[in-house]
Structures are given as structure tokens and as C-alpha cells.
Amino acid sequence: MVVPKPDSDMIRGTLDMLILKVLSLEPMHGWGISERIQQVSDGALQVNQGSLYGSLHRLTRQGWIASEWGRTENNRRARYYRLTPAGERQLGVETTHWDRLSGAVERVLGLT
Amino acid sequence: MRWWSEIRVRMRALLGRDTMEQELEDEVAFHLEREAEKLEAEGLEPREARRLARVRFGGVDRHKEAAREAWGVRTVMELGADIRFALRQLRSRPGFSAVAALTLALGIGGTVALGSAAHGVLVKPLPVPAEDELRVFWSAYNWRGVEFDHVKERTPVFQEVAAWSNEGYSMRRDPGSPSSLISATVGSAELFEVLGTEPLLGRTFQPGDDRPGAEPVVVLAHGLWTRAFGADRGVVGERILLDGTPTTVVGVMPEGFYFPDPAFEAFVPLELDPEDGGYQGNGWLVLTGRLRDGAGPDDVAAGVDAITRALGERFTYPEQWDKTRNAHLVPLREYLVGDSRAPLLLLVGASALLLLLASANVAALLLTRSGDRTREMAVRAALGAGRGRLARQLLTESVVLSLVGGGLGVLLAVGFFRLLVDGLPLAPALRDTLGLETGALLAGLGGAAVLGGLVSLAPVRDLLSGGPSGLGTRGGTAAGGPGSSRVQRALVFAEAAFAVVLVSGAALLVRSVDELRGIDPGLDPRGVLAVDVYLGPGETEAPEREAFFDEVLLEARALPGVESAGLINRVPVRDGGYQGPIGIQDRPELTDTNRPNVAFRTVSPGALEALDVAWVEGRSFDDGDRAGSLPVALVNETMARSLWPGKSALGRRIQATLAPGWFEVVGVVADVAVHDLVSPTPMAAYYPRAQTEASAAGGFLLVETEGDPTALAEPLRRLVGTTDARAAVGRVETMDQVLDAAMSDNLRLRFFLLLFAGVGLALGVVGIYGVVSYAVARRRAEFGLRMALGAEPSRLLAQVVRVGMLPVAGGVVAGVAGAALASRFLREVLFGVAPTDPAAYLTAALILLLTGLLAALVPAVRAARTDPVGALRAE
């Protein structure tokens, strides 16, 4: 019997979108990205720190973000990710998509 | 630019893997450090902070793996693992792997090597520019000089026409050096203009080189130049001795150039003297022309018609050898290698068939094995391997196996190519031009990979057709998927069919060789050595040559062990020879073109005795038949019977093709094969050498001994050299070799087909055995149960044998049908046996059914002896 794999695409896709959003503000290293997401969401969104790197590398392969090694404020070597023009477009696409989805969900929940 | 970043990441991941791994390491380390710092700032102990950071990160290695997967190299890395796993699997089953890889290696190696040889002979460009413009205009009776001139002047389709023939010469660089015999192409001055090849050094022929009285010149082929002149560039302009005549070397041809075949190593202008017998008398020339620009097939056909019509108007041809009706205009390649085509293609086809058979066999073996591995697959599926992943594993294993086989095959092809080529039914000189082509090797490896994919189809299908639960529950019973036994039967069917085709082909060749061996050549080859002896006419006088040959003959007879020795102008079976119309005194009505066409043989006393030719009536020649004594002749039985049916030929007076005067028939001898073994023996007359060709420059010394004739070769060479240092010894062959050479194409083809058929049968046996064994193993529990319930062992036996034999029988029927359809490809190479000979097919079918039965019986007997208790307990 085939056990259906949980469709993780939505979750993963959401993380991707959040990463793109964070990077659209400024270039950032992996740890910073996860911190930023937690801070901004007041800890509501807990990033699975490990799977963050899978997403980052996948987004790099897709050409939406790029990375280079830089120095932190404490002069430590870290890999900084930044949004590429293609990533900017993708962020637009995903944001629209998300708005439509969350709007729909809200409307359903708003039924009285 | 998505594709670009994709490629960049993948390339970096593959090529700069270490760097990327290091970077990932650094990145994760940095993350953990920052997280720990943060936790410390919140008041945790440094140690505890680091621990918690790792916990929060959650499975460092798993996430590194996820990041790696994102690089897109996982497939490639898994492939590496798959390959390593496949190799381990192959090593763990050395017997199975060796059989599978070796059968594939034989098939692939054979096909690659034979394909390469066939390509070299049939497709590789000839060493002349624009070879498709070159045509050979030939007649079975060859052209005379006067006909060449006639054609040359009326040539609507050719830009230029040249005439050529082939001759042997004795060659010495200077008078002090030893003579060697070389074969040369003699050609008219236009020859190189027609061929269009430029010389490497010096010049080729120029107009006037072929006129009577022109200064003798020679152009050397690259091989002779390298071998005999040490590739000395200064040889151009040097005078060498050809047949003792000082001859200027005017040019050297580039490497690889030959015409008409690589055995001819020098090019000598053809002297066309209208006064000479070769100009008016018998045909000895072949014409080659280059078509005019834009001449299409219709123009060519019309051109041939025009030429033959012109010939018919100018010359009168007798009915039985009308050159206007058997003249052919064929592409150069067809003329040069046309005879090799059928046997070569036959062999390539046979080896391809063997390869198919081997593939079917490997597929059947893999399927059997995948049945055995059901449990392994089930375990792996339970541990989370996807079915696609398992299919990929099976595919990898089978491709790896095929590539191992292909690699071995390529090694076999490289290692045995020379041996193989030497065994091919080809002109010896042509063999030297063949090399194993890189393209063929690559095609072999590529083909192996494709084959690997194809043969894995059955097990993969098997795997995919069963659900995962099926994989699990059936694991214990060693059963394949539902379709596997059907596929296996189909594979056995195919193997049997291919094997029948191979075996019936071999059977046909065996019969053909038997037929050839059954031919009576009219001579006894045992203990006879034929030695080509030559004394150049350019530097010797006629009496000198006569004395030389007399002395050689005397000395040869005095050698220990020699029973008889004599000279003959042509070696029977091998050399053919002059044939022409002669007058018969008591048949005056046979005039002009109606005169009998008789082969011209000159012999010294002892020659026919050395060959043990049977006498019909009359006497032989003896030393009394000399110049000045009564001119005498012997005729063969065919001649006696056709000219004087029912009467004695003795006392009749006949002419000779190449000698003047009338000769009295003093004896009749049995027919001796002239041109080859298979063509009907023509009328032939024998004349005493002393009365016709006493001063000839060459002759074949036939020496018969009681022992091994090859032991005489060296003494005879020495004897010739000491008798006259200017003399040369050419080809030395035993008559047994001559006869074998006459059927060598058939012998060689028989050898290969027997080999292929043997391997094919062995493969078939392995396949049938494997499939039946597998069926038996699978149904062991069932057999045990039935035995326990009282089933007759003999019924089980019969049932199992039927499982194996049904597809074999079907395959045999299909194979016989297929072989009969393909048999027309054999027509050209068979002698005395029809390509559809029922006996050959019956033999093949019986052989296959019997071996199939044997292969099925072994496991069937095992099934009938199943121990019921053991079989049931094993479940």
C-alpha cells in the first residue's frame, strides 16, 4: 500500500517566499534570515533552521538568489545571499499568489 | 537566465565538489556559532548553548544532504553508488556475470571487428579521387590492344580510358644484388590520368611512355619503395633492373595508393605494339575509364551500348565467346571487391545474429536473477527505496554488465583483429589494408550501453508491474512478476530461432565444402611442391635460359627424396592461363571463329607425372621430344571426346594457341582443373616445353616427394640461386595449399559459421536450462505438494520438459522459416547445395531440439526428484 507523502510543497513554498521577502530588504546570511523571520513574525513563524539551507541552495540553483562570501560586523566570514532580478520577479509572483490564497481562506473563514 | 544558474551550480557541484562541500561546512558552522552566541547571551552555559544550537538546527547531516540535493547532483552521486553496488552485485555472482559478460563480449567483439573489416572493404573510399566516376569495362575474355584502341577512339561516356593488366617481374636494384619477383600493374600512358592520383615523388606515366621503343620507366608503390629501397628519396632517376632490363624509376606513389589491388607494387607502362601478338591476338587487357562530368546512369548504359555496337561492327566474334554480349561496365569498387561482398556481409549478419542471441540470453538470465532477488527488492522497498529508484538500480546493473561485456568485446576485437582478418575470405593483399576503426569500437561500446538498457526492460517491467505489497508477500517464494515467465518463454523462443538460423547456415557451408572436396581435380596433390622460377629475359639470351631451366630440372630430380620433377607454364587450379582458338587438321570445317577454344599448357617430361595425372591412352612426353623432333601434343579427355567422339585421338594433328606449326597427338590424359575447382574444365592441350617455350623466362617447377614437400622449399631456392644468381624464386606453394586456396572462401566461411553456430548453440542451451531451472525452482512447493499427494514423477518430468520445449519448438519453426528467407544471401557462396537444402534445415532443427531437450531434462529430473517434505518445509 502506498502511503501518500504529505504534500510539503506548500510549506516549502512558503519558506521560499519568506526568504525572498527577507532578502528583498537587504543581503543576509542564513542565520540572519531565520532570525529575521522569527523576529518579524514575533516568533509565530519558527524556521526549521536545518531545512533553511536546503531552500537557500535550491533558490540559488533556480537563479532567484545569489550568494557570495562576505564579512559580518564582527569581521567573521559568512555567506551572504542576495536577491537577483529574477528573484524579485518571482517574489512578485509568489506574493500575488499568496494574497489570492490567503484572501480566499479569509473569505471562507469569514462566512457567518 | 535560470538555465544558466542551474548549469553553473551543477557544474560547480560536480567539478568543484570539494570546495562546495567546504563552503557548506563553513556556512553551517557559522550558523551554529551565531545561534550558540545568541543562546549564551540569553544566559546559557557555552557548552549547553552549543548543544542546544545543534538540536535546534536538527540533524546537521540530514540538512547538509538536503542542501546537496538542491545542488542537483544527487542523481549523479547516486549513480556512482549504483554503479559501485552493481559492480559488487556482479562480483558476488561471478559465474552468472562471467557467462553474461563473455557472451556479450563475443557478440559485440565479433560484430565490431567484422563490421570494421566489412566497412574497410566495402565502404571506405578507394585510394583514388572521385571513385564513383571510375568504371571498369571488362569482358570475361579480356580485351586486345586493337579493341582498346577502338574503344578509346569511340568513347562517348568517358573523359579518358586506360588499359591495364598485371605481370610479374624479377627486380634487382643493381646487377650485384639478389633478384626478387614482384607483381606489377602494366598500364597504358593514360592510367594515372584516369585514376587521378598524384605521385609522392617524381612523376607518373606521361604520353609516349607506352610507345614501342620508349625508354623503360617504372613507378613504385609506397610499400615496395619502403621495403626494397629503404624509402630512399634519391631513388627517383635511378636505374634498376626489371627482368634484367635497365629501367628508370620515375616516381613513387603515396602511402595507401594501390591499383587494382595492393599486391601490385609497381606500375610499368604497357607497351602496345600493333605488330605484337598481344595487340592482335588474345585478350589480356582490362579497361578503366573516368566518366564524363554529369554522365548519369542512362548515359552510361547508352554509352556501353554504343561501344559494344562499335566493337560488333568492327570485329567478328564467335558465338561462344561474343565479347559484345558479355562486356560489363561496372563501378571500380564492384570490380575490385565485388566477390568479397557476399561473404563479408554474410559474416557481419551472422555475428549480429549472435549478438542478438547473446542479448536475449542475458535478458533471460537477468530476468531469472531478478526473480531470485525479489526478496532483496522487497526489503529495499520496505526500507523506503522508491520503485523508480529500484528500477534505476536494475537498469544500472544491466548497463554496467553490458558495458563490461562491451569493454571485453572491444578488447577481444583489438586483440584478435589481425587473426580474424587473416581468416576472412578476402584477397590476401586486401587484408593488409584493413585496420580496426575507432568508430566501430565506439559504436560497439555505445551499442553495449543501449543493449544494457534493452535487456533490463524485462526485469524492470517485472518490478514495476508488482505493487509494493506484492513485493513483500511474494518475497518468500522466489517468484517474479506475473509477466516474467511469459517474457522468458519469448526470449527462449527468440534464442532458439536465432540459433537455428546460425546452425542451418553452418550446415549449408559444411555441405558446400563437402561438395567441393568431392570434386576430382584430376591430380593428386600429395607431396607436390610448385615453385615459381624466373630468369629475366632482359639480360639473358634464349639458349642461356634454356640451359638454366634444364639444369634446374636435373638438379631438382637429384635432390634426396624427389620422386619426379617437371616444369609447367601454369599451376593447375590456381593460374588459369592462355586459352585460344586452334586449328584441327582433320576438322577443316572448323574455321576462323568456330575453331575450338583450347587452353595452352606447356610441360617438360615429369610434370604430369609429378601430379599423377591419369592416362587414358597413348604415351607421355620424354627427353626425345625436343626441338627438331616430331612436334607432339597431349590432349585432355574433354577435348578428345568433343572433337573425336567415339574415336581415338591418337595420331590427329592440332595447332597450338601460342606456338606455330602442327603437333601430332600422342596421348590423352584425364581432365585436370584449369581455372578453379568449380568451373567446367575447358578443352586443354599439352605441348612439350622444349618444342614451344624452350626459352621462356619463367616456369613452375613441380616437384613430387614422398615426405613433406615444404621441406624441399629451401633446397630448391638455394639450387636456383646457385645455378644462376640472376634468377628469382617467386611463390612457393604445395599443391594441397593450392587446392585449399581454391576452396578457401568456403573453408573460411564454414569455419566462422561453425564457430558462431557453436557459440549460438551453447548460448541457447544456457538460456533454456536457465529458464527451465527457474520454473522448477519457482514451483518447488507445488511439486512437493503434488508428490506428497501421489503424483507420478514421470508426469512431473514431462510437464517440466514441456515448459522448456514448447518455446524451443516454436523458435525452431520460426527460425527455419527465417533462415529459409535469409538463405538467398548464401546463394552466392554455396557450391553444389541449394540454399534451401532441406537436409541442412532438418539437421539444424534436430540439433537444436536435441540440445534443448538435454538442457530442459536436467532441471526436469531435479523436479521429479523433489523431496516433498523438504520442499514444503522450506516454505
Image (spheres, coloured by chain):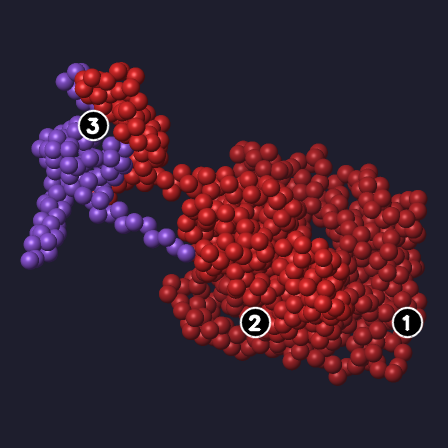
Which of marks 2 and 1 precedes in the sequence? 2
In the rendered view, does B255 fall on the left or right side of B277? left
What chain is tagged by disc 2? B
Residue bearing mark 2: B327
Chain B tint in image = red
Q: Which chain is purple?
A: A
Q: Which element carries disc 1, helix, strand or loop?
A: strand
Helix, strand or loop at label 3? It is helix
Q: Which residue is mark 1?
A: B616
Q: Residue at x 43, y 42 (%)?
A: B79
Of the 4 image quadrants, the one containing the N terminus of chain B is: top left
Query: Label 3 marks which chain's residue?
Result: A
Badge 1 density bin: few <14, some 14–19, many ≥20, Cα 10 Å = few
Look at label 1 and name its amino acid. Val
**Separation of marks 1 and 3 at Cα, in angstroms:** 113 Å
Residue at point 52% right, 64% down? B483
Query: Residue B501 occupies which quadrant of the picture?
Result: bottom right
Q: Which marked residue is nearer to the observer: mark 1 or mark 3?
A: 3
**In the image, residue B288 above or below residue B1:** below
Q: Amino acid at mark 2?
A: Ala
Nearer-the-camera pick, B1 or B460:
B460
Element on which disc 2 rests: strand
* Residue denoted by label 3: A31
Q: Viewer-proximal residue, B299 or B778? A: B778
| Residue that appears at 59% across and 56% down | B477
